[in-house]
Image: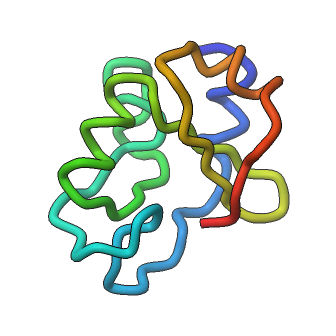
Amino acid sequence: MNLYLQALMSAPSPGSSGRCAVCCEYPTERHHIVRRSQGGADGPLIELCRDCHHDAHQMRLHFRYTDRWEYLATVPMKYERALEVQGWREV
């Protein structure tokens, strides 16, 4: 697990509002912000709709935590590259 993922693992899960954290649709799925295959089974979860969850797995939707959770919708790109892109929005 790299340093970016380790930092995400220590962050709290975003609070639940009963809506998708990105598009405000009804959430149907819970997304492991750090993939289970990369050690994120016990890490923070975020509620997403099916479309946003699909985008997250296609590397078109990224999450980061500073003092609050933020997301970035992009063309497909790796997380490390997404961290360099402007336009992050609060969850």
User: Which sits in the foreground, 12 or 70?
Assistant: 70
Write the residue at 32% across / 49% down: 52
Identify the residue shown where x is 24% and y is 69%: 27
Classify the position of the C terminus by image quarter.
bottom right
- Residue 39 is situated, as x and y percent measured from the top left of the image, at 43, 25
In the depicted structure, whether residue 50 falls above or below residue 49: above
Q: In which quadrant of the rendered view does residue 46 lie?
A: bottom left
Nearer the observer, 36 or 58: 58
Relative placement, left or right, of 61 versus 82 is left
Position of 23 with respect to 68 (left or right) is left
In the rendered view, tell whether residue 55 sits above or below residue 30. above
Residue 84 placement (x, y as % from top left)? 82, 24
Residue at 34% over, 36% down: 55
Q: Quadrant of the N terminus?
A: top right
Q: Viewed as shown, does residue 27 lie left or right of 15?
A: left
Image side of residue 20 versus residue 91, left or right = left
Q: Nearer the viewer, residue 2 or 70?
A: 70
In the picture, residue 54 is in which quadrant? top left
Which quadrant of the view contains residue 80?
top right
Could you tell me which residue is drawn at 82 percent across and 52 percent down? 66
Colour theme: rainbow
On the image, the x and y values in percent for residue 35 come to 38, 29
